[in-house]
Image (spheres, helix red, strand yellow):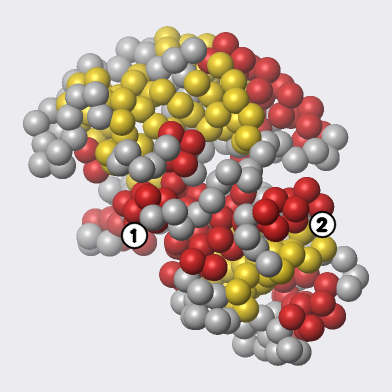
């Protein structure tokens, strides 16, 4: 196996490792595309304090090169999505057969090796065949959609209700699109005009700037009732007080995202309003539902700002991403063609 590994902060090196060619109940996959995001840059520069060494890369697809006989219908040459999130199999919840409540999920590219490598071996239950109606690029967004499904499930979103989404980046945008799919009304809030513009082009009608007029504008949209449900995207960089301020009394606030290292919450106003909080950090077990939703055109990813790159460009993606973050510039997702 040939891949890229973070050995320490700012220390990305190409590595070669031998992996078992074949083990029982496993599939060998040639990784064909990996999408890198801002979260990978914060692992690279040490802001997110990962346990090094770590192969980054959370979102990936590949082609099956070898598969044991299996009841899932997975065969050689199939295009597959690899689920980055899997339960630990060790904790109390896992041992009593409730892996959905696992105490310590393994997440590829975060706390266990990710997909920035040519080949990898997986158990069957982490690999999903991709139907023709799902493009490679769409498949790279499955894990975002899985997170959005977890958010919708937790918030029990109902038809017609207003849901404020603070954070208009890819995560917030996909959550808002899914809210529309379930016939509720999202209000996207961000301090970044570019993300609000993308939200508009994605079909999200209410987009608001996170500034001093926010509370008044949300009141106007909701007829003074304020949103009963609020989503705060943990990577958005906006003060969490905005989420508390626009919540209705007894509202539910979901903190959602793949990382949380900068999120601080002042509870004083939340206590007065008696808010209920949820924290959602993965979309465990939602991959199949996500694939079906994409095949049914539930979300549109064509408006996202995506870059593309080759295998050899990988070090410069991390260097440039870090440079952008230092200058306060949002880092676009980059799709790496692993065969180039
Ligand atoms: Zn567990």
Residue 119, quarter of the rendered image? top left
Q: Which of these two is toward me, 298 or 219?
A: 298
Residue 47, quarter of the rendered image? top right
Badge 1 crowding class, 10 Å Cα cut-off, few under 14, some 14 to 19, many 20 or more, is: some
The N terminus, quarter of image: top left
Image point (53%, 24%), residue name: 336
Badge 2 crowding class, 10 Å Cα cut-off, few under 14, some 14 to 19, many 20 or more, is: some
Name the residue beneath numbered marker 1.
100
Q: Which mark is residue 161?
A: none
Residues at discs 2 and 1 in contact (Cβ within 8 Å): no
Image point (44%, 70%), residue name: 153
Instruction: State the SS at label 1.
Output: helix
Q: Is residue 104 above or below residue 163?
A: above
Q: Is residue 321 above or below residue 3?
A: below
Visible residue check, residue 218: yes
Q: Where does the image place residue 233, in percent across and percent down from the top left?
A: 64, 58
Q: Which of these two is toward me, 26 or 148?
A: 148
Q: Is residue 142 above or below residue 229?
A: above
Which one is earlier in the sequence, the residue at label 2 or at label 1?
1
Q: Where does the image place residue 53, in percent across and percent down from the top left?
A: 52, 24
How far apart marks 2 and 1 lie (CA) works out to 34 Å
Residue 310, quarter of the rendered image? top right
Instruction: State the SS at label 2.
Output: loop
Image point (30%, 17%), residue name: 19
Q: Where does the image place residue 274, in percent across and percent down from the top left?
A: 65, 86
Q: Where does the image place residue 199, in percent across and percent down from the top left?
A: 68, 56
Name the residue beneath numbered marker 2.
191
Q: Which of these two is toward me, 101 or 211?
A: 211
Image point (34%, 21%), residue name: 30
On screen, residue 273 versus residue 150, left or right, reads: right
């Amino acid at each position: 196996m040939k891949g890229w590994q973070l050995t320490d902060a700012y220390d990305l090196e190409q590595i070669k490792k031998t992996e078992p060619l074949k083990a029982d109940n496993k599939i060998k996959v040639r990784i064909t595309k990996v999408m890198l995001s801002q979260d990978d840059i914060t692992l690279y520069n040490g802001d997110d304090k990962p346990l090094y060494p770590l192969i980054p890369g959370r979102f990936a697809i590949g082609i099956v090169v070898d598969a044991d006989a299996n009841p899932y219908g997975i065969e050689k040459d199939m295009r597959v999505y690899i689920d980055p999130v899997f339960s630990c199999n060790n904790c109390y919840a896992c041992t009593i057969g409730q892996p959905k409540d696992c105490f310590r999920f393994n997440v590829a590219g975060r706390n266990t090796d990710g997909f920035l490598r040519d080949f990898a071996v997986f158990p069957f239950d982490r690999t999903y065949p991709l139907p023709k109606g799902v493009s490679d690029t769409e498949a790279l967004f499955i894990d975002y959609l899985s997170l959005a499904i977890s958010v919708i499930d937790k918030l029990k979103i109902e038809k017609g209700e207003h849901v404020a989404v603070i954070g208009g980046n890819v995560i917030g945008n996909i959550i808002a699109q899914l809210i529309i799919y379930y016939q509720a009304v999202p209000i996207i809030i961000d301090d970044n005009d570019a993300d609000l513009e993308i939200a508009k082009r994605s079909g999200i009608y209410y987009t608001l700037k996170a500034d001093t007029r926010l509370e008044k504008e949300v009141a106007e949209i909701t007829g003074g009732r304020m949103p009963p449900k609020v989503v705060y995207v943990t990577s958005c960089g906006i003060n969490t007080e905005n989420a508390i301020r626009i919540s209705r009394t007894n509202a539910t606030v979901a903190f959602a995202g793949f990382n949380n290292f900068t999120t601080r919450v002042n509870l004083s106003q939340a206590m007065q309003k008696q808010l209920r909080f949820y924290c959602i950090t993965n979309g465990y077990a939602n991959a199949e539902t996500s694939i079906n939703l994409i095949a049914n055109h539930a979300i549109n990813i064509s408006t996202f700002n995506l870059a593309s790159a080759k295998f050899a460009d990988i070090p410069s993606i991390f260097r440039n991403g870090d440079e952008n973050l230092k200058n306060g510039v949002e880092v676009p997702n980059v799709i790496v063609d692993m065969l180039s």
